Amino acid sequence: MATALLNPTEGAVTDKKKRYSAGVLKYRQMGYWDADYVPKDTDTICLFRITPQDGVDPIEAAAAVAGESSTATWTVVWTDRLSACDSYRAKAFRVEPVPNNPGQYFAWVAYDIILFEEGSIANMTASLIGNVFSFKPLRAARLEDIRIPIAYVKTFKGPPTGLIVERERLDKFGRPLLGATTKPKLGLSGRNYGRVIYEGLKGGLDFMKDDENINSQPFMHWRDRYLYVMDAVNKASAATGEVKGSYLNVTAATMEDIYERAEFAHELGSVIVMIDLVVGWSGIQSLSNWCRRHDMILHLHRAGHGTYTRQKNHGVSFRVMAKWLRLAGVDHMHAGTAVGKLEGDPPTVQGYYHCCRDSYTKQDFSRGLYFDQDWCDLKKVMPVASGGIHAGQMHQLLDLFGDDVVLQFGGGTIGHPAGIQAGAVANRVALEAMVKARNEGRDIANEGPDILRRAAQFCTPLRQALDTWGDITFNYTPTDTSDFTATPAVAG
Amino acid sequence: MMTNPTGRLTQGQFSFLPDLTDAEIGLQVEYGLGRGYAWSVEYTDDPHPRNTYWEMFGMPMFDLKDAAGVLLELRSCRQTFPDHYIRLVAFDSTRGIESVAMSFIVQRPRREPGFSLSREEGPGRTLRYTIRGHEGDKPEGERYRE
Amino acid sequence: MRHRVAMASPLYSLPGAPAPETAAPATVPAAAPPRTIGEVLAQSQAGAVIDELDAALVGLAPVKARIRDIAALLVVDRLRLAIGLEAQTPSLHMCFTGNPGTGKTTVAMRIAEILHRLGYVRKGHLVAVTRDDLVGQYIGHTAPKTKEVLKKAMGGVLFIDEAYYLYRPENERDYGQEAIEILLQVMENQRDDLVVILAGYRERMEAFFRSNPGMRSRIAHHIDFPDYEPGDLLRIASLMLEAQHYRLDDGARAAFEEYLARRIRQPHFANARSVRNALDRARLRQASRLFAEPDRAWTAADLTTITAADIRASRVFADPPPAG
């Protein structure tokens, strides 16, 4: 194997005089590579996928990642010696070639708990992804997964509501929740917008949703939207006897604006507000605290995540983002559909769902889960499946994701030939029929289409939906698979 | 009558499907028992969406092996409260869940008049909303009577 | 059920949509019907349980014969059902009479399994109770207690040991009568959901039935459990020891035979239960015997063998030998 060439024994320079004399040392000589290092229970462990530049030794590259994401700079500095510098150095301790991907290596790096400010995702990410992704000796680098020690997990409050309490507040149990994003995303007036909300909720959906780029543009001021939406929500609640909600997007230019919008949503009696990932970690954590104080569910739209997560060899995997978001404290997060129009192969997407909902995430290479992760009773996030899904895929969605998920059928509701209420009815009937059949012991993955056809016999709106979209699936080769096969480590 | 597409109260897991037969209810109960849930029979004449606490028809049934025990209680509840809403509720005591895991309506009153929405004007264009059951103004025990 | 056609199904009525059609009824899938006794036994795997009952239980010949008869009846009923002959659910409630330790609970567990395999109870578990589990101490306490036990037993077999204690004629207002009435109701109306087995001493059970004819009429099968023969008890002892990796040497075997002959004549003899207790005490004595020599290396044979001395130390031998 290629790693045999790596000479893992060549490591830190221990002679203090040589180590700290002015000049340039290799990262591995500076103490950022330690093949014998045994990570402590309190260490954060990162798994990077690195692609070193031609001629760069993979171990030196891994050590460089460890160095640049902790204490190192390009040259030796005497001021290191004023600190207990060895404990501040991240330590790369294992490197392996990525199977079937020549030139790529998995590198495991451990970080001492002193490196991160308690309860701050901004601080943790500033270290872990702050510098190293633009580092010249690497052609590309990707943070594949992260093991966060329970000692650090416990410094976060996590989701303000959590999926269990969310269900109790909504009085909805034992089935996925149903939602839809209002379409068209842009251009509707407040009055027209509220119409879509009312029809969808009265027809049988639990939630409607603002899209990520609905803020307060010239065609619709945010206060106007909130007022009309809440009238629709309350009317639909009275018409059905159910608790209903609509995610009011509070994303705005400044934190002050965000709070102002959230306060107004609260004043109008909304059960839920929404924020976009692009506001940044501090904005998310601030709003999360606000939600905890205001009995509000916090929906996160992962707008922009693709810029981090899409490239397989560079960026940050969504499973890492999901872990950070659970710590930062959101109640909903978009985590992919596997069968819809957006990226993601089914096992990998299921891995994201595990990060949202597990009490203890078990290592599972086929789902891209490289580490065990103890969530120590942190509340659970409700994952959201949204984008290009429709009633005809109900059996696949329920089979892949189970009950604790929000299924969002935007086009699949609003595009129904008989109208929005009919679209909502079709989705709700398909969902209830599938949950009922699964509980009765039917094999829904295989019998799903038959179960839907039978339900369509007594529900015309569902029949119309199946006639319109029944056979549509989005089959593209997924670009993000785990690539890992469990082989014994060669280096480290 | 309610004006949503089903014409009835849509709380619970299966309100959009034709009423479950007792055999079908039994299958759902079996599913819950198989997962270790404890079932409970609850009834109310006040199905307001925020009315969390329906009356308990006896305590939750722990350690049952078969749905027949739950159906026994359900039949007994139907006999006692023929004009009420009745739902079956399953509790999951797993650490980290410790909440309701299933809930569905198994009896409805013949007539479901639904709810009214009243609006109270607030400052600016804001409104405060109150949902009130059409039967809710009657005294307890006299609602949903023909 | 009450007439509630108007609300039996959702309407799915939408502005401008055509009138909805009626709902399709739910269908239950059916398996291919069996045609031979062998097929019933193979499909249900009940044959294996019956054979196991024969093999694993010592003695009890009349009991085993009765159970085979009942199983045969149920298997033939299955065949009759398969060719469309309407069969009422047979009453399967039973009464087991016999002295303590004659295998009533063990056989009840096997019966539950056989009935489960043949599809006469859905789950096949056994809930064993006595009067205290059914009868309360206050007014209004008994019905919920009895119902709770019944609900837990549904889908399986409810085994009521010493059932006659439910009836206390000396106390007119005894709450036991309330439990009996609830039991009778369920035994009659929910035969599909539950099989009840009453158990106890024969004479007392007969007295109980004399005072509660309603209960007698609902019991279809009376099975009497005879006391074990000494030879059976010795075999039972060997099986119990084998399961715990012990054995009797020849001297111990002779001693135990003698022990049984004495013990059977003493009061409170409880058949297999007494054998188990005697063996438990013999194991204690064996352990003490080995313990007395702390420095000796014991072989596997030493550790697993019970000797005559371990048996003969029993105080049963202190009494004079049985007359005749």
Image: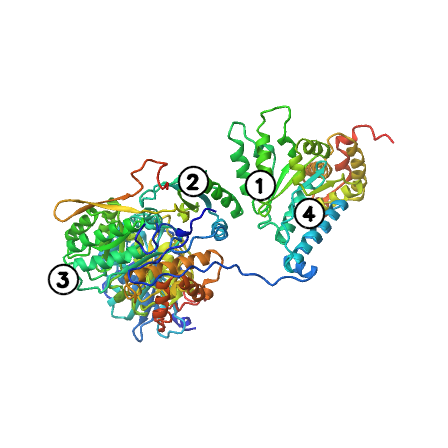
- At label 3, counting other C-alpha atoms closer than 10 Å, the crowd grade (few under 14, some 14-19, many 20 or more) is few
* Horizontal side of residue A253 vs B19, given as left or right: left
Which residue type carries mark 4? Ala
Q: What is the chain identity of the residue bearing mark 3?
A: A
Give SS at disc 2.
Answer: loop
Q: Label 1, secondary structure: give it.
A: helix
Label 2 marks a residue whose chain is B
Instruction: Work out whether residue A17 can be spotted.
Output: no
Q: Nearer the viewer, mark 3 or mark 1?
A: 1
Residue assigned mark 3: A219
Residue that numbered label 2 is attached to: B81
Q: Give the amino acid type for the residue marked by disc 1 in the picture.
A: Val
Q: Which residue is mark 1?
A: C186
C-beta proximity under 8 Å, tags 3 and 1: no
Q: Are marks 2 and 1 on the same chain?
A: no
Q: Which residue is mark 4?
A: C243
**Which SS class for mark 4?**
helix
Three-letter amino acid code of the residue under disc 2: Phe
Q: CA distance from mark 2 to mark 4?
A: 55 Å
Q: Are marks 1 and 4 on the same chain?
A: yes
- Please state the chain letter of the residue tagged with numbered disc 1 in the rendered image: C
Residue C225 or residue B12, whichever sits in front: B12
Q: Position of residue A70 (x, y in %)?
A: 27, 59
Where A452 falls versus C174 (above or below)? below
Q: Is residue B138 left or right of residue A444?
A: left
| Distance between the alpha carbons at the discs numbered 2 and 1 | 22 Å
